[in-house]
Amino acid sequence: QKEVEQDPGPLSVPEGAIVSLNCTYSNSAFQYFMWYRQYSRKGPELLMYTYSSGNKEDGRFTAQVDKSSKYISLFIRDSQPSDSATYLCAAPDRGSTLGRLYFGRGTQLTVWP
Amino acid sequence: DSGVTQTPKHLITATGQRVTLRCSPRSGDLSVYWYQQSLDQGLQFLIQYYNGEERAKGNILERFSAQQFPDLHSELNLSSLELGDSALYFCASSEEDRAGELFFGEGSRLTVL
């Protein structure tokens, strides 16, 4: 079982739709969770960073963590064609380095005009 | 632009050969990470260096090695290449005390024929 599991999609929605992207994780010791966005032919870039359970909002993006069910979600409101990318959830190892990230496989999102 | 520079962007080589991928981290970042991204495995952590010293090892094959130089640039050496080594190789850097906030380069796409 992978540390972080994510449905690869693809997901295709019309402009303006609300998008829900989801991941599950297996290690209850994970405390931090991230969402990275990766455009085609580019490296991943950090989108959202959360700690512990609850919601975190940043503009049209909301990250949600439910530690009781080991579920991570990213919601995108009023989705735009520029949101078309692959979204990867991640959690860092709590061992000797906090930079070792366990990534989900990524969900490919297309927002069409 | 993340500030992380990777060369070469594309590389095509034959099985059994050896290649070197190069990474320059963001100015001031002491940690460098190498990740491999393939369609079947997703983004996998390979190895981390901090200020010239190996800090953590992930799913890195014995045929692969890396190092970080005094000027903080890093190189990933891949030898005895196999078809299955074809992938995107990403370098990332971070400030030491920020868990999970990695800045990725644009990657080096390796094709082994």
Image (cartoon, coloured by chain):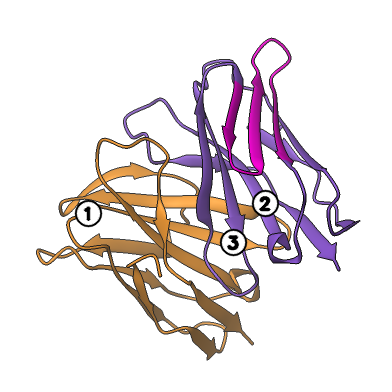
Q: Chain of mark 3?
A: B
Label pair 1/2, CB-CB below 8 angstroms: no
Label 1, label 3: how many angstroms apart (C-alpha)? 22 Å
Secondary structure beneath label 1: loop
Residue underneath mark 1: B29
Q: Nearer the viewer, residue A76 or A9?
A: A76
Residue B53 vertical placement versus B18 (above, below)? above
Residue at 45% from the left image edge and 53% from the top image edge: B46
Query: Which chain is depicted orange?
Result: B
Magenta region includes residue A62: yes
Horizontal and vertical percent position of residue A35: 58, 43
Q: Is A44 situated left or right of B33 in this image?
A: right
Please state if A13 lies on the left or on the right of A102 as rendered. right
Instruction: Name the amino acid, label 2.
Output: Tyr
At label 1, the amino acid type is Asp
Chain A: colour as depicted: purple
Q: Which residues lie in the magenta part?
A: A55-75
- Which residue is labeled 3 in the image? B37
